[in-house]
Image (cartoon, rainbow, N blue to C red):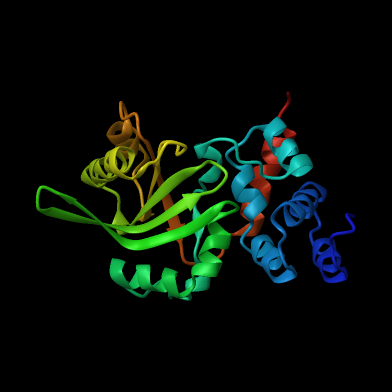
Amino acid sequence: MPAKLSWTHIITLLGVSDDTARKFYEKQTVLENWGYRELERQISSSLFERLALSKDKKGVLQLAEKGHIITDSSEAIKDPYVLDFLKIPQSHRVTEKALEQKIIDNLQMFLLELGKGFAFVARQYKISLRNRHFYIDLVFYHRILKCFVLIDLKIKQVEHYDIGQMNLYLNYFKSEENVEDDHEPIGIILSAEKDEVLVEYATGGISNKIFVSKYQLYLPDKKELQNKVQAILEKEG
């Protein structure tokens, strides 16, 4: 194991029984300079499995060998995002305002969940168009991709007009906020539920980079995710 890892890191990693997952967490700990508590958090939230499910067999093995290397906007997005650290009971009905405040109160953990490269810019970012005012819930900047990342929070299912609103925000940022070296902004609509078919049709033909991801307030079923990743690895080719 790399010399950069402490004894506590090593003990934590030895608790990961799957070799492929353990290699990933070892590599990612070095890449992102995780402390052992951050490492524990990523293991408990099944980060490897969540990232692996969007890849083929080659991609999963590459993830283990090289870690999570971000080269384009799609690789910076997770689905779902695990927000168990907000400690909101599943049965509790939370408002979008309260969800946003919880995220701000736990910003360090939220940045860890977002992943490497995200820097916080603002909350309730105001934009004005001919005396009409709009507020973007959360704005970040991605240092690796060199672009703004706009996040809109939804406590219910995403609707087509939510996607249209995000498209407006992205067009505004491209025109009014981007400077010479900035790449096109990314929009993430973070929702409790999403209809895959509706999202596919609502985003079709839109040139802006809009992603709709679910959030969950509890840790995922690790065994179920592990079985799905194993099925990917057992495929031929």
Q: Where is residue 136 in the image (x, y as percent from the top left)?
A: 29, 56
Rendering quarter of residue 53: top right
Rendering quarter of residue 47: bottom right
- Name the residue rendered at 56%, 40% in the picture: 75
Position above or below: 94 against 50: below
Q: Nearer the viewer, residue 156 or 11?
A: 11
Q: Position of residue 168 (x, y in %)?
A: 24, 42
Q: Is residue 35 left or right of residue 14?
A: left
Q: Residue furthest left?
A: 131
Is residue 73 visible to the viewer in this orientation of the structure?
yes
Q: Residue furthest top?
A: 237
Q: Where is residue 46 in the image (x, y as percent from the top left)?
A: 64, 57
Q: Which of 51 and 26 is in front in this view?
A: 26
Q: Where is residue 188 in the image (x, y as percent from the top left)?
A: 39, 48
Is residue 220 visible to the viewer in this orientation of the structure?
no
Q: Which of 43 and 211 is in front in this view?
A: 211
Which quadrant, please, contains the N terminus? bottom right
- Name the residue rendered at 10%, 47% in the picture: 130
